[in-house]
Amino acid sequence: MEYVVVLAIVVAVFVFWDRPVMVLQFEDGELTKSKGNIPNGFLMGCKDIAHKQPFSGKVKVYKTRFTTKLVFSKTIPSKVKQRIHNVFPHTGGSKKHGRRA
């Protein structure tokens, strides 16, 4: 019985653990912390956006089987979010999207 409880806790930890592929943390327009394999163009674009319109917050990138998702902290303004979405290189579907047999 004890093993079932321990197994349930371990499974819950793995399911609900926050595992972003990339993390960028900005404070007052400066990149303070970065984590993950960040493409150089995306990193330079984010730094440029932060330099022109200073903001504070976190940008997290999650990758699933089919898509890549950007998650922003609440302190980042919507116009800045859109600009970061525009410089993000991994948007777009699979290569088979739109093809017919």
Image: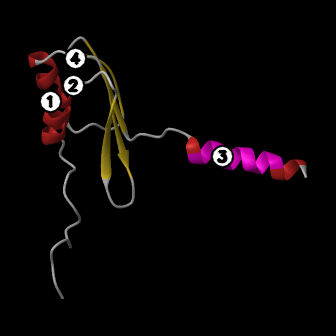
Compute the Cα span from label 3 to label 4: 34 Å
Identify residue type, mark 1: Lys
The residue that mark 1 highlights is 79
Residue 61: where, in percent of width, then height? 33, 40
Hey, which quadrant is residue 39 in on the image?
top left
Compute the Cα span from label 3 to label 2: 33 Å
Residue 94: where, in percent of width, then height? 23, 65
Q: Dots 3 and 1: beta carbons under 8 Å? A: no
Compute the Cα span from label 2 to label 1: 6 Å
Compute the Cα span from label 1 to label 4: 11 Å
The residue that mark 3 highlights is 12
Name which of mark 4 and mark 2 comes first in the sequence: 4
Q: Dots 4 and 2: beta carbons under 8 Å? A: yes
Circle 4: element type: loop
Q: Dots 2 and 1: beta carbons under 8 Å? A: yes
The residue that mark 4 highlights is 55
The residue that mark 2 highlights is 77
Identify residue type, mark 4: Phe
Q: Dots 3 and 4: beta carbons under 8 Å? A: no
Residue range in magenta is: 5-15
Residue 57: where, in percent of width, then height? 31, 21
Asked if residue 10 lies in the magenta stretch, the reply is yes
Q: Residue at x 17, y 15 (%)?
A: 54
Residue 101: where, in percent of width, then height? 18, 88
Q: Given this view, does label 4 or label 2 mark the residue nearer the observer?
A: 2
In the rendered picture of this protein, how many numbered marks are placed on residues? 4
Residue at the outermost top position: 28
Q: Given this view, does label 3 or label 2 mark the residue nearer the observer?
A: 2
Name which of mark 3 and mark 2 comes first in the sequence: 3
In the rendered structure, the answer to whether residue 52 lies left or right of residue 94 reads left
Q: Dots 3 and 2: beta carbons under 8 Å? A: no
